[in-house]
Image (spheres, grey):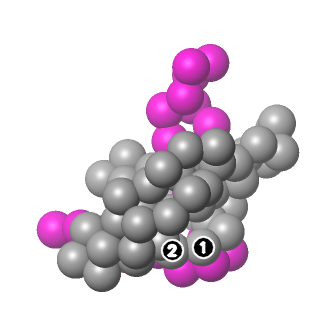
C-alpha cells in the first residue's frame, strides 16, 4: 500500500548522513524540475518535495522512501 502525504506533514527519510526529518512541501503529479533535477511523476506514481529541518535543503522522494513522523 502506498502512503499518501499532504503539504505540512512531518516525515523522515534516509539521507547520506543517516536519517533526515522535515516537512512535505508539495505533492508532484507530473514531470517537472525540482530540487535541481528532472522529476518523473504522475497521478498514479507521485513523488513528494520535502524540506529538511536540519539543512533547510529540499529533496524529492517517492512515497515508499518516506515515513510519517508523529511529534
Magenta span: 1-21
In the image, what residue occupies the spot 38% across and 47% down?
65
**Residue at 57%, 57% in the rendered image:** 33
Mark 2 packing: few (<14 Cα in 10 Å), some, or many (20+)? many
Say if residue 40 shows up in the picture: yes
- The residue where tag 2 is placed is 27
User: Compared with residue 25, is residue 64 higher up or lower down, i.e. above or below?
Assistant: above
Quadrant of the drawing holding the N terminus: bottom left
Q: Quadrant of residue 6?
A: bottom right
56 to the left or right of 23? right
- Residue displayed at 82% across by 36% down: 55
Mark 1 touches mark 2? (CB < 8 Å) = yes
Q: Residue 46: tell me if it is visible.
A: no
Q: Nearer the viewer, residue 64 or 47?
A: 47
Identify residue for label 1.
Answer: 26
**CA–CA distance between discs 1 and 2?**
4 Å
- Residue 32 vertical position relative to residue 64 in the rendered view, above or below: below
- Quarter of the image holding residue 15? top right
Quarter of the image that includes the C terminus: bottom right
Residue 13: in magenta span? yes
The secondary element bearing badge 2 is classed as strand
Q: Position of residue 5 (x, y in %)?
A: 47, 74
Q: Residues within 10 Å of mark 1 (few under 14, many from 20)?
A: some
Amino acid at each position: 500500500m502506498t502512503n499518501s502525504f499532504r503539504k505540512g506533514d512531518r516525515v523522515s527519510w534516509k539521507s547520506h548522513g543517516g536519517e533526515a526529518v522535515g516537512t512535505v512541501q508539495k505533492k508532484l503529479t507530473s514531470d517537472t524540475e525540482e530540487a535541481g533535477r528532472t522529476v518523473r511523476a504522475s497521478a498514479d506514481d507521485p513523488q513528494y518535495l520535502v524540506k529538511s529541518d536540519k539543512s533547510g535543503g529540499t529533496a524529492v522522494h517517492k512515497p515508499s522512501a518516506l515515513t510519517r513522523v508523529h511529534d
